[in-house]
Amino acid sequence: MQKEISIKLKPNEALNDTIIKEYLAKIIGKSINDISGFYKTKQSIDARSRQQIWINLSLQTFINEPFHQREIDKINFKEVHHSNKKIIIVGAGPAGLFAALKLLEQGIQPIILERGKDVRARRKDLAILNKEGIINGESNYCFGEGGAGTYSDGKLYTRSNKRGSINRILNLFVQFGAEEKILYEAHPHIGTNKLPNIITAMRECIIEHGGIFLFEKKVTDFIIEDDIIKGVTTADKDSIKADAVILATGHSARDIFELLYSKKILIESKPFALGVRVEHPQTLIDSIQYHCAIRDENLPPSSYNLVEQVNGKGVFSFCMCPGGIIAPAATQPNELVVNGWSPSKRNNRFANSGIVVSVDEKDAWKEIKTYKSQLASYNQNNPLLLMHFQQMVEQKSFIAGGGKFVAPAQRMVDFCNQKFSSSLPDCSYLPGIHSTNLQTVLPDFIYKNLQEGFKSFGKKIKNYYTNDAVIVATESRTSSPVRIPRDSETLQHLQIKNLYPCGEGAGYAGGIVSAAMDGDKVATIIAQQILKTIKSNQFNHQIFYSLSSKAIIHFLLKYSF
């Protein structure tokens, strides 16, 4: 017999299989020898009590029958070397990669065009950025194989409630080398040190089965005839044709948004969030969350999730990285963006998180109209308004840091009291930080709302509001500031047929898993459409060859064959 049983254990007990079996036997009224085995289906930490932290487990328990390890639903991919159906995928982030895997599963050849480099070559460019302050505009924390998530943490948590799709995505990660624990942890995490090997395994699978993978292949134009996309043109003047194009370029591909706008292809501005990255000592966050002086060695480094309404706007934590590092995430010179990541063990001595404020068109317009002399063609309805607002703040931050991606920074209490920080604490940000009054960097409404937000968070969590915390500007690439509208059923662009906007860059995802789910969904729709067309053509041919010669002529005139 098999039964799913939920139990609550102390942290040290949750790591001991014998103790777990004893609890299971007691719950079902059997001997421990009757428990042949178990595996975890859910695991979470309950740290609400100051007296005792609990680990909540759900266990698939085998009682008086042979134990079988968890079965991973492995996907079988088809050979597509000679497929006559080809789909271009622009971008090799999670949306693009999982779209390609779905197409392989359906027997359709994906052609992936990635502007950046593979994960290994990309790592060298990141090292140069961190050590020398020199950025490669096509190979950085945002651009390159695996997208922004590969070298910016690898968190697999999503708020989506489409559990079936989430399970598929997580199972595929395991199939390509991720640890099985991501299948049951409440907040699964792979880690920046492990993701590159998994991404490489996906690429090798795609190529092995006949998919085409091209690096340093930047798309610069679309081939469109009668509002139907036929293919793309690349920076090296190649023209590549296909049956459809999946646009999965990520939230930082501003040149793609500019291209769409210049070709009068429908896009629209999308509210996003902008703010700063805050770093505390991890020991401090552990003491706050676990109510202890020293974290139990059986517990992972702790995280937090904060949200507050300030002046009618959301101020909230974003991409919290326990045991993490702050990284430079700009995509071109003279712009400063920071993001966070954690290795799989989350064993760095700092904890960092974005703390951001929601931004809409009205907010951006109040700021950007000051620059109207430089942006004479702008008006409040320009779909690139929020993108250029985002860019302006990043440029201001770069100048304030003094160059080479050194980041402007300030202690938290000093920030809230409008006081210059005469010294700054140690910080994980490798290019370095420079003491700055961040009021001169951030838009006024962002600055004031963050001030109130930090004070409110300090009331919610004792000791969070402290000058031991350092604020680093600017966290601005939280999501895409542009949406590419698509039909809710066919997922095609509302204006251009066979163009499929996809993932975070198109405004339909927020993070690795949701982007992967969207890529999978778009590819599923494309495969269904292709299969429908093939069946329709087969049916028409069957009718055609069953007709008399007179009827064939009528058929040709009617269906324009």
Image (spheres, rainbow, N blue to C red):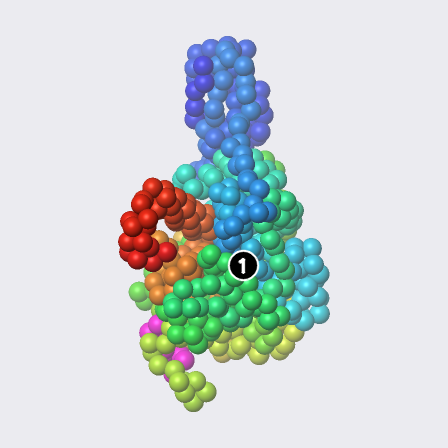
Residue sticking out furthest to the front: 549
Horizontal relation, residue 106 to residue 404: left or right: left
State the extent of the magenta-drawn residues as a range: 361-369
Q: Main secondary structure of the magenta part?
A: helix
- Residue 38 position in % (x across, y down): 52, 22
Residue in the foreground of this view, choosing between 535 and 473: 535
Question: Image quadrant for the N terminus?
Answer: top left
Q: Secondary structure at mark 1?
A: loop
Q: Nearer the viewer, residue 408 or 477?
A: 477
Residue 511 against residue 219 in the figure, above or below: above
The foreground one among 66 and 217 is: 217
Q: Is residue 339 visible?
A: no
Q: Residues within 10 Å of mark 1 (few under 14, many from 20)?
A: many
Against 43, residue 525 (above or below) is: below
Left or right: 535 in relation to 130? left
Q: Is residue 314 magenta?
A: no
Residue at image mark 1? 91
Residue 30 percent coordinates (x, y): 47, 10
User: Is residue 183 positioned above or below 324 on the image?
Assistant: above
Viewer-nearest residue: 525 or 188: 525
Residue found at x 60% / y 44%: 209
Name the residue: 33% across, 74% down.
362
Residue at the spot 47% in from the left edge and 33% down from the top edge: 42
Taking the spot 48% from the left edge, 30% from the top edge, the residue there is: 41
Q: Position of residue 314 (x, y in %)?
A: 36, 61
Would residue 221 be seen by someone viewing this image from the given angle? Answer: yes
Count of numbered tags: 1
> Type of residue at label 1?
Gly
